[in-house]
Structure formats: C-alpha cells, structure tokens
Amino acid sequence: MFGILGRTALLLDGALQDNWGKPRERAVLGALLVHAGRWVPVDTLIEWAWPEEKAQPQNIGPTFHTYATRVRKWLRQLPTSPSLDGGGGSYRLDIDKSLIDYYRFTALLREARTHAKQQDSRQAAESARHALDLWRGRPLDDLAGEPARAWRLRVEQDDWLGANRTLLAALLDLNLFDEVLTRIGELQTDHPGDVAFATQRMSALHGLRRYEDETAYYFTVRRRLQHDGDEPAMEHVRQHHEGLRTPDGGGSNLAPRSPDPVIVPRQLRHDVADFVGRDDLLAELDGAVTDREGRVTSGVVVIDGMAGVGKTALVTHWGHRTRRRFPDGDLYVNLNGFAEDASASQATVVDDLLIAVGYPPDADLTGRARELLLTRLLSGRRMLVVLDNARDAKHVEHLVTLLPDALVLVTSRQQLVSLSATTSARRVQVDPMTPAEATALLSMRLGTRREMTRGELARLAALCGGLPLMISLLAAHIATRPAGQMLAFAEQLDGRQLIVDVGEDGDAVTAQTFFTWSYRALDPPEQRLFRLLGLHPATHFNIHAAGALDGRSRAETTRSIRALVGAHLVERAATALDRYQLHDLVREFAAHRAESDEPVPERQAATRRLASFYLASAVHASHTLYPSRLAASELAVERGVEPVVPTDSAQAKEWFDLERANLLAMIRNAAATGHHDHAWRLTDAAVIFFDRHGYYEDSLAAQKIATSSAQEASDRVGEASSLVGLGRVYLTIGEHREARRHLDTALRIVDDIGHEAGQAAVLGLLGKLETQRGDLTAALALYRRGLKIAQKNDDAQGLCWTSCRIGEVLRAIEQHDEALVHLTRAQILAERSGDQSAHASTLIEIGRVHHDRGDHSTAAAHCEQALRAAEAIPDLAVSQDACIALAEINKARGHIRGAIEFTRRAIRMSGYSTAAHAHDVLGDVHYANADMTAATAAWQEAVEHYNRLGNLPQATVVHAKLARIPRTDVLLPRARSASSPPISTTADHHDQKST
C-alpha cells in the first residue's frame, strides 16, 4: 500500500517502509500519488515538492529522469507493479487508487456518509472508524511546496474533520456517549473553537444524564463565543442547548427528506481542465454554504467580480468538487446578462429548469402557474442551482424566491447589494489571481510551448493583471505564433496591445470585447466618467479628483462612482476612505475608450480641470503646513473644480502623504499635455513637502520637469524658482557641482530680470554651499549680500533665514556675541511669521553658542525644544541637526550613552551631509570614552563624507584626530585635493523660499 496520509510510504513484504529513497524522490512520488492517473507537468511537481526557499534543480530534465528511474525501481518491488510514464515534460503514475490510503480513506468516508443518510448509524460508525484508522499523521508531511501545503490544509479541514464529525454523529445515534466524549476530548485539543464538536459534546453529556456538566459547558462555550463576537455561532449553540431539553432530548431540527426525484439533472458545465490555485476562494465558498455542523445549507450566495476574473470557472470547479453533496442534482443557467445577445428572461429560465427536471411546461399553463410548479417540484430537494452572469439584482431577485430549498449560486459583474439585502444572500468577491497563481496558469495554458523562462512568464502574467480570461487569451494568441517569434512578441507586448489586439487574428474574442459588455451596460453619465478616469495619470484617486475630471456636481459624481464600483469597473482602495483605483487593464481600456469616444476638446478640458484641482489643493495644503512660505503666483481655479482645503496641519500632511505619487504623476502629465503653467506651479507647491520629508528623488524629478515647463511657458520667474529648487535639492544630497551649476544659472536670471527676492534666496543657498565646503569667509560674504537685499525689501522670511545662517557662521568662527545678535533677531522674526523650521534651527544655533561657552544645561534646553518642534512639523533635516547638537552637548557633560544614541539617531535619519558631522561627533564621543576602535571607524566614515562633500578643511581636521590614534594596521583616509569631484551624500534642506 502507498501512503500519503503521513509521509509518503511503501508497503513491502508486509511492512510499511517510511524511509525508502531520498527525501526529494519521496516528495515527487507523493505529488504523483495525489494526481494518480493524470499527466503532471514537471513544473507542477517542482511546485509541490520543492519549498520556496530551496533552490530548484538546475538541470530539470536529467534530474527528473534520475528520480523517475529510482521510483520505478521501488515500484517494481510491489506486488501490483504500478507504472510510471514520462514524456513531453510531464509524468503520469498509473495505479489502482484503492492501493493509496488517501483514496481508500475518501471511499470509506463516502460509505460512512451514505450509511448515515440511510440512518444506518452502526455501519456509518464502522466505515468512519476504518477511514480514520488509515490516518497516520499529517498528509504528505514530507512535501513542503505551497500547493502541497494548500492541499494538506484542505484535506485536514474538509476530509479529516468531516470524518470525525460523521463518526461522532453516528456514535451519538448509537448512544455511545462515553466514546464520543473521549474522541472529542482529543479533537478539541487542536480544534478548541469548533462549534460542531462543542454541540456534540453537549449532546453526549446530556445523554449520560450529566445535566449540570452540560449546562456548565454550554455557558463556557457561550462566553467564549460572546468574547469573540460570533453571534451566529452563539445563537446556534443556544438553540442546541435548549433543544436538548425537548421531550425527545435529541436537539435535532432536521426536516424529513423528500423522496429522490425521478430525474437527477447534472447540468454543470465541464470542469476547467487543470484548474489552478484559488484555494482561499474555494474555502470561502465552502464556508459560505455550510452550517456549523458542516451541512450544506439552502439559500443564495452571490459571487461577484470584474470581467474576466474567473467567477464562472470558480463556481463550476467548486460545483464539481462538491457534487456528491447535492444528491438531487445540479442545474446551470447562463443568464447572458452582459453579452451582446439579449439576456435570458425569467420566463425562459423557468421553462428551462422545468424541462431539466423532467416536466416540460404545458402550453396552457400561465407564467405564474409554471413558477409554482417549479417551486413544488424542487421542494425538499438538495440541489445546486447556478445562475451565471446576472446583469443586476432585478435580473434574479424574483427567480431565487422560486428555489427556496436549493443552494443558489449567482455570478455577476455587479455586487448585487440589494439582492443581499432582500434575500440575506452571502457574498464572495473574486479578486484577480496572485502572481504565483497567474504564472502557473499561463505556464499550464502554454503546455509544451515553454521556450520562455519563468521570469518571462511571470512578466506576461503580471501584464495580464491576474485575470484568468486574459491569461487564456494570451496563451492562445502566443500559440499561433512560430517559435522564433514568440519571445520577440512577448518582449514588446504592452497593456494596450493586450486589451485591443490579442485575439484579433483568430476566432477568439479580445479582452476589449468582455470589458465593452460591462461598459455598455452603464448609463451614459457613468460611461463618460469611466472614460475620463482613464485620463488620470496615477493608480489611485479620490472623489474630488474624479469630480474634477467629471465637471459635474459632487453628488452626481459620487452617484456615478458608486455605480462603477458596483459594476467592478472601479475598486475601492485599501489606503483610505473615499479613495478609488482602477485595475491596470481596466485603466488601459478606459484610456482607450477616452481616445476613441471622447472628443479632443472634452479630453483637454478634463485634463486641465484635473491639473487645476491638484494645483489648487496642493497650494492650500502647502499654505496650511507652511504658512510663512512665499508661494508662486496663483492661477484661477477652473470652473467645476472643488479643491481640497485642509482645516489643519494634520489634514494637510495626510493629504500630501496620500497624494505624493499622484502629485509627481500629475506634474509629468501636466507637462506632457501642454499645461506648463500648472506643471511648474504644482511643483513649487509640492516640493517643500518632498524636501522636508526626505523624498529627494521625487523632488529632483519634479524640479527638472518644472524647469522645462517654465521655459516652455516663457516664465522667467518660474524658471528661476525651479532652478533654485533644483540647486537646493542637489545641495541637500551633497552634489555640489550640480548645485552650483543650477544656482549660478538661477542667479543670472534673477539678476537679469531684477528679481531681488530671488537674488536673496540664491545668495543664501550659495552661502550654505560654501559653509558645507568649509569656506566660512566666502559663506559670510554671500550671506551679508543677501541680508542687505532682504533689508531693502523688508523681506521678513529672507531676514529670518539669512540672520540664522550668519549667526551659524559667526558662532563657528567664535564671534559669539555678534552671533547671538543675529540669532536673536532670527528667533523673533521666526516667531512672528510662524515659521517653525526657522525657529527650531535658530534655537539649535543659540544652544550651540551656550554650549561653546560652557553653559551645557541652557544649551540642552534650547536643542531639546528645537528637536520637539522639528519632529512635530516634521522637518527631517532640522531633526538631524538637533540630534547632532544634543550629542555634542551630552559628550561635554560626560553622558556618553546619551551622546552615542543621539548621533546614531541622526545617522539613521539620512545618509546625506549631516552624516559627515554626525560621524565626526560619534568619533569624538567614542574617543572620549576610550573606545579607539569605534572612534577610528566613525572618523574614517566622517573623512569619507567630508571628502565627498568637498569640505577639505574639515576632512583635514578629522584626519588629524585619526592621527592621534597610533595604528599600523589601518590605512587612514587622506583629505582629497580641491580638484577631487564631490559625489552624493547629505546636506540640510532649508531656506524653502520661492523666487
């Protein structure tokens, strides 16, 4: 006998051989045993037998040939000599399934359930015991692949637990209550929450007249279910407990079965060949149609999902898998709700069902009489009825009332919410396949045409968006191409081609056809909104953005969005309330419909409204977060646009967090569609958030687009502002050469147009650049030039930041009194303007002055206040600077542990210019703590960072510190020459001022 209920074993000479062969050979044989009599591709065997973390065999063909040879050797030792055949990259094990303990187990379980149905409890118990005796541990316990784990879970949950429930029910009927308690005690150790076991335990206690124990146990179970919030289970247990008190004491409320029908219809469509994955959905369907005792219930289950997601295939496969649970037959009707042909009427469906059960309708019967006849004929019968492809709830809501004793599965592209409300229908939503499932399906559909690698298959499967329909169409399309063209076709395929072209050159319909059916089922306002959503440049959007595209009132747009969600053409996003998204292929289809159905002027107007929405919303959010910042000149908001207006800084930050990717996409889109005035202004409003939160790559990308758009719009101020922004970001990330190039260009423009506020901003950034390079004299000169311009123009923000930077330089050259004058002025100006970043920066520099003078307590108080303020804004660079200052102060106070923690906090925040200073201070701390190894490592990092920044004086200072540590085995880094090119590292990122 072969075993797969446990380890894969062989019965040789009367003894069970668990350790035959090598582990992987046993695993491959186990996978073949599960698929006995079927051809199994090698890829499938690998997925079953190889854990995901283990490397797959490099030479698959020779490896499996070796395995097959060894397995055949073992098979020849068995009396029955099963055969193992191979060919075309697949293997098939021909064997009498009665020799496999799993199939013997399932056969005995079917016998037990048949006996139970016939009320022969003794035979039911005997068959169930024999079935459970075959169980030798976890099935296929030596297989670690994901499909094996899923199969194992299903078998344990459905078959093993089901067999135990069947046995316990038979034992209860035989009044063998002690055995029931013994078995349940063992089962509940691993399955304490199983309500069926709980009710059977209550019945056994009641049968033994242990009434107090039964009542006490009931309350224990009830409290647990109440704690879990499982009200249906709690009600079920209560009814069972009260039923035990009825005169018969059985607690059973099963209605008597009706006699079997004369005709048992079997109308399910053919099962899907090589059905892949969907274990979670199959389990969800199982749960939706069974009660706590595992019995199939009547009622309605709605299976909904977008076009092509595999609803019909799922229901058909589930129906075939559970067919034995519907002894009175299964009925299938295609309601044709979304096809080009007319949908099936209720009268037609009723007539078809009457014919299926052997009662062709009499022409003299009225429609209502036929309905009543159908209800009477199906009354009391355990039947499965599949109503496939319902157009909407009205299509089926009366029909399902004619089938009260059947289990009715309704599939639809609509959510059928009203049907759930009127019939208490349960709902199973079918989502796209996982990447692994989609790749496996594509591989299986291609069959022997496997010229592509797994990576290429995965890319194509991802392009299909997890839709089985698309995967099948693509596989069929590829199969029509010569082998030499297959890879080239796969490499150039994109989403638009997949929607429009795949299937056109054969007899198969295209994906566009299926989506078109859903699209045409919409009313005109929803069709138009759906098209316009295809113009949105990013994946997610909120109702405000949809309204901007739509141009109608908020209420009208909301109604249309809800209709699109109900039709599974728009999905609710998981990120936040009131946010939506389109599946990638649906988005391609929407964009295609916009290009083909929406007039060019309408498309341009919608795109302009969308750009206006994002610009106005970003300006409001930026002003709320950074009220002191000077913004670019505004554009009038387009008619029909309702921008988001945050009420406080928390809402503004949340909006920026949610819309960050959309803002960058919208900047690109506005530039690409010719809305250049919106593109550079939107950048101006958004990049301060990007910079303050460390999204420097996004900021660089946006500023480059903004610079080009301002040039296209012939807006010199916008061009200078964008160049200043680029220079600021490059300065922040330590790219001094690029920073200087852009800032010099910006300075020429503002000098040329006489824009003095812009001149002050550029001079301030050039001063910061010289500060980072260690040329404090040049920095001070640039700052003083900027200060004069700010004083002349009464520019409070320019005065604030420039005074702060001058104070920073004066402190560095130990002119503390003059430094405090400038820093105090900056503090007052920052408090007046509400610029929290400037205020925090000023507090840090004041704290450093006190630190230099030896007043460490006052210094720490200022820097701690600055850190709290910076983290509340938040402002990443100021937070880093505060941590470095506090580390220096802690070191001076002898608090080594605190100093190390603050420096490490600063280093964790970023890898840019502050990292040089942070490593420098960390080395000082370790040196003071006599940890020379750690000090050397930190200072070496600091030298490298200073060299990359081009700050040669500070690199020389740190190198001198390293020289104090006598080491012969460490190569100390040298300060680079002035000609050494700087490369990317850190800088702080302030003076956020638009020109």
Image: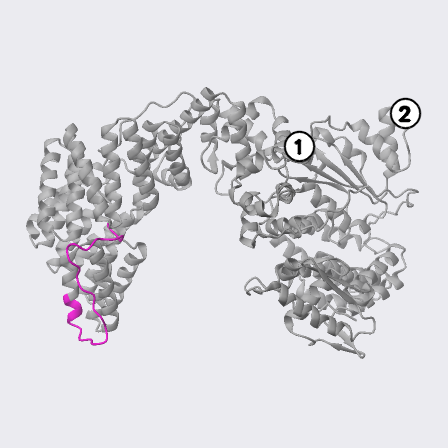
Q: Which mark is residue 741?
A: none
In magenta stretch: residue 658: no
Please rate how many residues cluster around mark 1, counting C-alpha atoms within 10 Å: few if below 14, some from 14 to 19, many from 20.
some
Residue 279 spot, x, y in % from top left: 66, 52
Based on the displayed image, in which of its 4 quarters is residue 74 positioned?
bottom right
The residue pinned by badge 2 equals 365
Q: Which residue sits at x=70%, y=67%? A: 29
Q: Position of residue 762 (x, y in %)?
A: 18, 39
Considering the whole magenta stretch, tell me its main secondary structure. Answer: loop
Of the 4 image quadrants, the one containing the N terminus is: bottom right
- Precedes in sequence: disc 1 or disc 2: 2
Of tags 1 and 2, the one toward the viewer is 2
Tell me the distance, in whole angstroms, between the alpha carbons under discs 1 and 2.
31 Å
The residue under label 1 is 418
User: Which quadrant holds residue 63?
Assistant: bottom right
Residue 915 lies left or right of residue 858; in this view the side is: right
Total count of labels? 2
Viewer-nearest residue: 185 or 572: 572
Q: Callout 1, which amino acid? A: Ser
Q: Quadrant of residue 746?
A: top left
| Highlighted range, magenta | 960-987
Three-letter code for the amino acid on which mark 2 is drawn:
Leu
Q: Nearer the viewer, residue 469 or 163?
A: 469
In magenta stretch: residue 962: yes
